[in-house]
Amino acid sequence: MPPMNRRTFIGASVAATLSAAAKPAWAADSAHQIDRIGLQLYTVRGTMKTDFAGTIAKVASTGYKEVEFAGYFGHSPKEVRELIDKNALAAPSCHVDYAVVENRWPETLEAAKMVGHSYIICPWIDEKQRAEPGGWKRAVDLFNKAGEASAKAGIQFGYHNHSFEFQPAETLGGKLPYDFLLAETDPKLVAMEMDLCWISVARQDPLAYFEKYPGRFPLVHAKDWVKDSSSNSGYQGAMGQSVKYGGRMADVGQGSIDWKNLFAHAGKAGIKHYFVENDDPKSAFDDIKISYNYLHDLKF
């Protein structure tokens, strides 16, 4: 999702819901289908502002079994938990801003523990910090520290990528920041929520990461991408300067990503939760239905 907008929705409060079952979501049957498709609620942020309860109900009626929050729009953890329960949903994950991890972690964990979160994900590191000498190392240190504290509370900390993490960083001697994060964070303390669209936009191979870091990716974001040289992408901040070609987001199954091949390796990756996301939907509820239908019917 667009970085400047995402931060508007993820920093103010933390809430959660019921934990998901331990069984991986792909293990519905021997044919390997996703039995608990999730939605990152940033996709429907427009109606979340004006009709929080109604939006959650519509997401559930579409067929989604899990949701991932990016902001709670002034609702208390208790209110969110009651709403999730009412709609027979689970919210195993939420996104919180880097500043929350840095400055408000104890109360964030307390709220998450109270309502049953399994994961708390940081989705962004500011560009200024990324450009500073030692900026990436500072993020690693914070993430390890946050992961240690969250583990004591029975919660897994994680990080969500965009495309800029796959651009060689001068401050890391030309290394890819994503490789640095994977190598320097403790795998027991810091999980990765791989955005399968953004890594593909960066022209990197998710399967290579699944192979090198098996089990490190318990959550993924699923959104598609249409390469289009005539499209002037509005996501340059998320994409990084190394991504030059044009394109636009699409509903899952409507773009260029080979989902069947990717999810055939879900066991190696350790994927347990699949969250649909569309940062720029044309019609949010129509779009989430298209993505849901595609993933619901997908066999891998």
Image: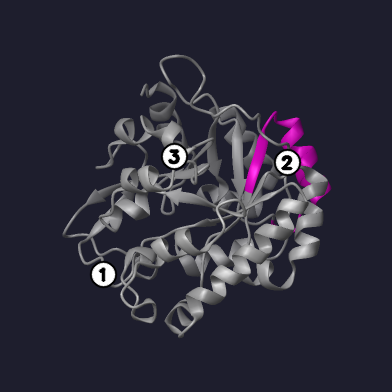
Spot occupied by residue 191 in the image (x, y as percentages of width and height): 55, 51
Q: Position of residue 60 (x, y in %)?
A: 61, 31
Viewer-nearest residue: 76 or 165:
165
Q: Residues within 10 Å of mark 1 (few under 14, many from 20)?
A: few
Residue 97 shows up from this direction = no
Q: Which mark is residue 242?
A: 1
Q: Residues within 10 Å of mark 2 (few under 14, many from 20)?
A: many
Taking 145 as reference, is 215 above or below it?
A: above
Is 269 inside the magenta-drawn segment?
no
Of the 4 image quadrants, the one containing the C terminus is top left
Please name which of the two marks, 3 or 2, marks the residue nearer to the observer: 3
Relative depth, front residue between 54 and 115: 115
Expressed as whole percent of the image width and height from the top left, the position of residue 215 reads 49, 41
> Residue tagged by mark 2?
17
Q: Residues within 10 Å of mark 3 (few under 14, many from 20)?
A: many
Quadrant in the picture for residue 14? bottom right
Kindly report the distance in space between the C-alpha atoms of the residues bearing marks 1 and 3: 26 Å
Three-letter amino acid code at disc 2? Answer: Thr
Q: Which residues are magenta?
A: 73-93
